[in-house]
Amino acid sequence: MNLPCKLAALMKTQDFGKFKDWFCEYVKGFYGDDELVNEMMRLKEEHTSRVCSDTEIIASRLGLDEQQKLLAGTIALFHDLGRFEQFRKYQTFNDFESINHSGLAIQILREKKILNCLDSTEIKTIEKAIAMHATKQLPGGMDVSDELFAKLIRDADKLDIYYVMIDKMEDYRSRPEKYSESLGFSDKPYLTDEVVEAVLKNCRVGYHELKTLSDMVLIQLGWVVDINFVVTLEEIKKRKLLGRVAEFLPDVPESKKVLAHCTEYMNERIAANG
Ligand SMILES: [Fe+2]
């Protein structure tokens, strides 16, 4: 993929290698005697590793060059860097109850001078993508290359969040008592009408509008309309992620309707590209 030449051949493979080594050492420092903390750290470490792999897949399928892949890999590696400190300090991954984890990641990278070996344009692109990886949507008028990398991390992150959700729901089904205090939603098998309607209209739904755990599963299906690249949709289809997530919805007609709607949306975008 051709991008403005300002990103030309600056970051080196060795730089990326150093980033990976530093990340491993940094994360090791968060493990200790507390098993809950260790489990949460492992969750984020494994998430990062899968997002890195998916970033490679999407970047290759988009036809990015080696330089762009290094940049995309760095963004993937550091996008959730703030999660470790966030949990240690606040014992939660909820940004509203603690701190913006994207901003925290950038703050840590700056304080530890991790990206100082890079060109200032590359640093800006990395920081922008990290800053925007979890926002509701991207602002208009972004620089073309900044937008590409921001879209890439958002897609790779969402792709993995489907797996995180499937794992969590499986774990919840096998030991619901573990979540009894932290769930925050009713686990009754009901869907909220307004949430169903919003997903069917391809509208975004805020967390504050969710009333049940099933609503939470439902909006994950709806995230398919926020996927930026058709290659990511093709991965979602290949991995049968919508169907796997929908297995956790209650056995009511609305569940089937939403799954059919999201599947149709995905298939139409894939077909339009072919
Ligand atoms: Fe994140």
Image (cartoon, rainbow, N blue to C red):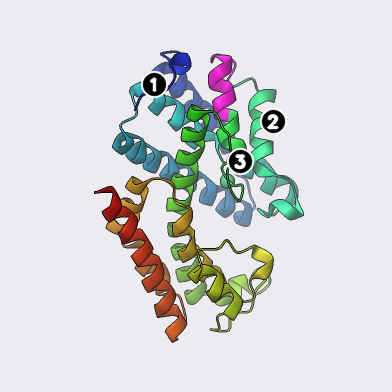
Q: Are marks 2 and 1 in contact (CB under 8 Å)?
A: no
Lower position in the chain sequence, tag 2 or tag 3: 2
Q: Residue at x 75, y 55 (%)?
A: 97
Q: Is residue 40 highlighted in magenta?
A: no
Q: Amino acid at mark 3?
A: Pro
Whole-number angstrom distance, CA of label 2 to CA of label 1? 24 Å
Whole-number angstrom distance, CA of label 2 to CA of label 3? 22 Å
Give residue 186's position: percent from left, percent from top. Answer: 63, 79
Q: Are marks 2 and 3 in contact (CB under 8 Å)?
A: no
Q: Is residue 125 left or right of residue 271?
A: right
Disc 3 target residue: 139
Give residue 172's position: percent from left, percent from top. Answer: 52, 72
Where disc 2 sits, the SS reads helix
Give residue 248's position: percent from left, percent from top. Answer: 44, 75
Residue 10, image quadrant? top left
Mark identifier at residue 67:
1
Disc 2 target residue: 107
Task: Using a 10 Å C-alpha cutoff, classify the residue at mark 1 as few (fewer than 14 neighbours), some (14 to 19) or many (20 or more).
Answer: some
Image vertical order of residue 200 relative to residue 137, above or below? below
Lower position in the chain sequence, tag 1 or tag 3: 1
Q: Is residue 20 left or right of residue 32?
A: left
Q: Which residues are magenta?
A: 115-126
Which residue is more in the foreground, 97 or 27? 97
The reply to whether residue 102 is visible in this rendering is yes
